[in-house]
């Protein structure tokens, strides 16, 4: 987990997603992975990237700290201390950045 | 349960939600949790926050007094003594504020 | 059962809802329950309140005489002796006023 | 079965609805039941009333001669000797007039 | 089977509907059954009548030669030697003329 | 299998449809079957005819070389060496020309 | 696997699709297979072709390196080092080029 992921994790303190939901903060800085994948934030209807901050009890395939890819219009947006966040269903997560 | 939650609970007295439904009053004052989550009420199509006042018999994951997050357009609105309330299905609740 | 409920029950005499259907008359006078819940009839897309007059054989959670809450646009409206009535599916009933 | 029902039954002679379908003729004259239910034919999107003339083999809850209530726009209309008729699915029948 | 039905049956020679599909030719001449049912071809969105010419292996309730009633807009139309035909799913057949 | 079918089969060489998919080439020349069925290509929303060139492993009721009837707008079109082809799901095939 | 496929595989390094998802890069150069299938990129709503770079754990019928055909509008597009990529569900893959 990067220091950025750790820092943002506080935002999810005191919040428990229900069932198959995943609480995600957006990755503000586009960091290149070893494989070089990134998602431009100006592109319309493109998937986006974030860090998992909290998960529901039925979530099986992602864990807190994972960097994930998801569709821009999936889930419900909310705002924490001026930062935009997202509640997604696990099935709307496209994949995980493993490196 | 905060004193605000207790005070509003009277609104649900004499009302029993059916099945998987949850009766919720909106949280008027935006209180920051330990994790700092709040939901701006001016944002369009943003999720919102409330307090569970009564639950149906099939509801499993939330209980009376829980502070919950839900999508702004979920459920059926009603009005009790000039306060707007909501009947939600449990599956439309995004998560619980645990602190 | 209030005297109003009994009086209206005659409207359902000779009518048997099929399956999971519930025959409901609207509550004309908004009576406050102990909990104070009422539904303003001028509000658009708001839930509404009525009294169960007859139920189908598969209905499990409401009975004749129950005061129920439902969405304004659920079910099929009909008119009996100048009074508007409603045939609902049980699953469209949001809850029961128990006091 | 009223004499009106018997008279119209000839219209279904030689026609066998398939599966869960019900062949219904409209009740032209609005007759009040003991309970006084009737459906005004000028009202838009209101349910309507008819007499069952023939039923498919999977129909369980209505029989030939039953007076039934259904939504105005359910089913497929057809015309027999200048009288409008209807083929409904059993699940689209709201209830039966038992008196 | 009327001679008209037999004559048209040649149109289906060499064609095997798949699964629950039914190959139907329209009944051009409106013949009254004993019960007098007919379907006017000028009416919009009205059901129509035809003769079954071939059936798929999963078809259970109609057979070749049956006169059937169906909705005007069900199925896929095709044309054989200048005559319009229809491939229907069995579930879209409303009933059978038995006389 | 006609020589036309054999000739076109090369187009599917090296392509394996997945699951319940069927790779079909359109029948350019309208050939009358014994039963005389053909589908005019100018008609809008009419079914069309083709020859099966390759099938997925879950396809059960059609085989390579079959002449099939399908709806004009079913499936995904593609182009091979200037000839338009089609990937259909097996369930979208209406029937087989057996002669 | 062609050298082109191998070269692009780096793009998927560090990315693990979830469940039944498949990570695909578009085939830029239209190469003819033995069977001659190709998909013109100027055609609207036509299927397209790509190379599988990574697969989720539930993917059963395609593997890394496979050349696949899919509908142009399936899946979620993303961009890696100036190259457009795609996350598809396995069921949206129409077939595999086997030669």
Image: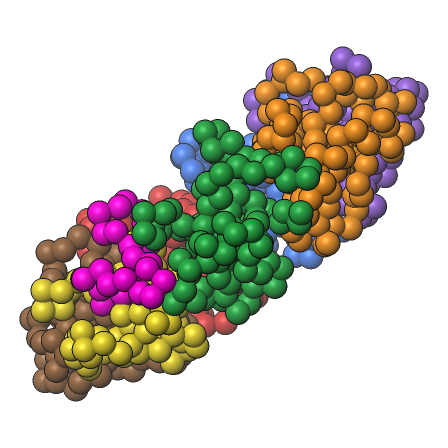
Chain colours: A blue, B purple, C orange, D green, E yellow, F brown, G red
The one of B63 and F9 positioned closer to us in this rendering? B63
Number of numbered discs on residues: 0
Q: Extreme top residue here? A: B82
Residue G65 falls inside the magenta stretch: no
Span of residues in magenta: E22-50
Q: In which quarter of the image is residue F74?
A: bottom left
Res G82 quadrant in image: top left
Res G91 visible:
yes
Residue at 79% over, 29% down:
C7
View extreme (front): residue:
D3
Residue C59: x percent and y percent?
74, 50
Rendered location of residue B76, percent (x, y): 67, 30
For the C terminus of chain C, give its image quadrant: top right
Judge by depth and name the residue closer to the eye, G94 or E93. Answer: E93
- Residue E37 horizontal/vertical position (percent): 33, 59
Residue at x 26%, y 46% (from the top left corner):
E43
The image quarter containing residue C57 is bottom right
Overall secondary structure of the magenta stretch? loop
In magenta stretch: residue E44? yes
C5 w.r.t. E32: above or below? above
Seen at 17% across and 52% down, the residue is F44
Picture residue at 57% right of the left edge, 26% below the top: B45
Q: In this view, does B30 lie to the left or right of G78?
A: right
Q: Is residue F92 visible?
A: no
Q: In this view, does B11 lie above or below B19?
A: above
Residue C76: percent from left, percent from top: 58, 37
Q: In which quarter of the image is the N terminus of chain C?
A: top right
């Amino acid at each position: 987990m990067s220091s950025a992921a750790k820092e943002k994790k506080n935002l999810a303190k005191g919040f428990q997603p229900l069932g198959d939901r995943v609480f995600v903060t957006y990755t503000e800085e586009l960091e290149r992975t070893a494989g070089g994948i990134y998602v431009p934030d100006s592109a319309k209807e493109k998937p986006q990237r974030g860090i998992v901050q909290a998960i529901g009890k039925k979530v099986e395939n992602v864990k807190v700290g994972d960097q994930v890819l998801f569709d821009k219009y999936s889930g419900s947006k909310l705002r924490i201390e001026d930062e935009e966040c997202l509640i997604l269903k696990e099935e709307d997560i496209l994949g995980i950045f493993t490196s």
